[in-house]
Amino acid sequence: MHPYYFFRYPRPGPYSPPSGFQHFPANYQGFYHPVYFYRTFPGVDPEMFMSSAKKMEVIMRDASTLLVNMAESRKFSYDLMSAAQQSKMSEVERMIKSTGISQIPSVSYTPDGLSLHFESEKEDNVKCCDLTLKLRWM
């Protein structure tokens, strides 16, 4: 250990500094004094946060509608799953649009699952929120 570090870190029990080293008063030599950095935060403006929450409500409603169709209609689920496994992208998108949702997700799939990615419209080239659903069938 470097000889100047003895005063910075706590030690169990008594610890005497090396002989001849008395640069600091005795009450500073046995423990470390933390330095606190205080940050100033910008003022809070919840407008964008509230706007994101409103847009997310729409996305969640569409995702919920789509999930209800998948959960309650065996034929819809079977057709969607078979089209996805056969990589029929246009058929999968057509089936998703047929549910009546306003936000059409981007769809990606593998042989064992389906991923639906919902995004909000960009406002001033800033994307506020998105939602990804990953569903497995194997």
Image (cartoon, rainbow, N blue to C red):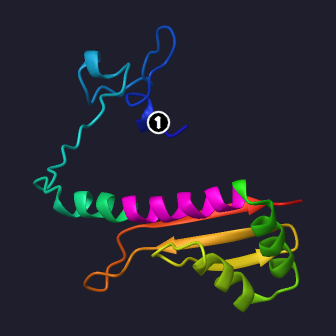
Residue at x-position 44% and y-position 22%: 10
Residue at x-position 49% and y-position 65%: 62
The x, y position of residue 91, in whole percent, is 73, 87
Q: Amino acid at mark 1?
A: Pro
Relative to 37, 75 lies left or right: right
Q: Quadrant of residue 55?
A: bottom left
Residue at x-position 63% and y-position 71%: 116
Relative vertical location of residue 5 with respect to residue 102 in this rendering, above or below: above
What residue would you read off at disc 1? 3
The x, y position of residue 94, in whole percent, is 65, 85
The x, y position of residue 35, in whole percent, is 26, 37
The x, y position of residue 1, in whole percent, is 55, 37
Relative vertical location of residue 100 with respect to residue 64 in this rendering, above or below: below
Question: Which is nearer the eye, 39 or 59?
Answer: 59
Question: Which is nearer the eye, 85 or 52?
Answer: 85
Query: What stretch of residues is rendered in magenta?
Result: 57-71
Q: Which residue lies most toward the top here?
A: 13
